[in-house]
Image (cartoon, rainbow, N blue to C red):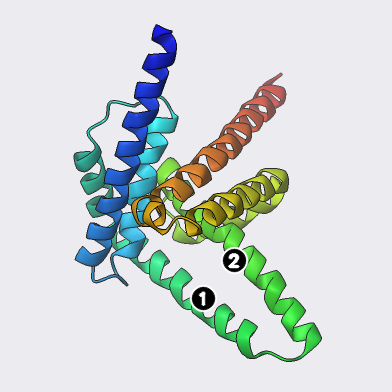
Amino acid sequence: MDKMAERLNDICIRILQLVYLNILWIAFTLLGLVLAGIGPATLALYTVIRQWIRGNSDIPIFSTFWKAYGSSFKEASVIGMIYLVIGWILYVDLLYVQSFYLRALVIFVSFIYVVSLCYVFPIMAHYDWKSTIVKIKCSVLFGISYLQYTLIMLLSLAFIYFILFMNSGALVFFGVSIGNYVIMWMTNQVFIKVENQAVLLESESQS
């Protein structure tokens, strides 16, 4: 009984933390005048969630968020704007392209875009790579190479947001943070597999 009460308390605390994180994301996105702020705010959000998922539950949320927001502001801002522009172009194409073959191509490219978008900020939060191009390339490579994880993630997101859109109040409080929690959890499983395979290959090459 005590364990159940403790578990329930942990869930309630996590829910409140997700609400707080959602508020921080909105505030810091606005701080960067939306276009420049959405990328750094998203990276900062993933940085906090990554720490939780990897067992660091007691990190100071605001200072961790602020440090991640400021330290990679320029790169995250540029990446955020790139994805916003590409997303807008693809959305317009889906609305107005009439040719069946061109529309099929746009849908395929849109899928690759969504996959890349789901992975690129978790990659930035997880790896200390210097090259922005490498991060974007790996966001596609990881997502396609571990397609089963990606599809499960996308289906989970579809289910979660279906529920949230039926409860607009919950969407306001959790609209960003809960979806990104799912993305970070799934991409973290991919990162673990990638790193384990890299260790295995290294040990085989040395033997």
Graded by Cα atoms within 10 Å as few (under 14), some (14 to 19) or many (20 or more), the crowding at tag 1 reads few
Which residue is at a point 76% across and 78% down the rendered structure image? Answer: 104
**Residue on which disc 2 sits:** 113
Front residue (pair 77, 104)? 104
Q: Secondary structure at mark 2?
A: helix
Q: Quadrant of residue 47?
A: top left
Could you tell me residue 95's position as x and y percent?
61, 86
Which residue is at a point 21% across and 48% down the rendered structure image? Answer: 66
Tags 2 and 1 in contact by the CB under 8 Å rule? yes
Q: Amino acid at mark 1?
A: Ile
Graded by Cα atoms within 10 Å as few (under 14), some (14 to 19) or many (20 or more), the crowding at tag 2 reads some
Mark closest to the chain's N terminus, 2 or 1: 1
- Count of marks overlaid on the render: 2
Residue 134 appears anywhere in the view: no
Which residue is at a point 43% across and 28% down the rendered structure image? Answer: 54
175 to 7, vertically: above or below: below
Which residue is at a point 31% across and 58% down the rendered structure image? Answer: 40
Q: Is residue 99 left or right of residue 163?
A: right
Circle on res. 86: 1
Q: Quadrant of residue 63?
A: top left
Q: Secondary structure at mark 1?
A: helix
83 to 157, vertically: above or below: below
Q: CA distance from mark 2 to mark 1?
A: 8 Å
Q: Amino acid at mark 2?
A: Tyr
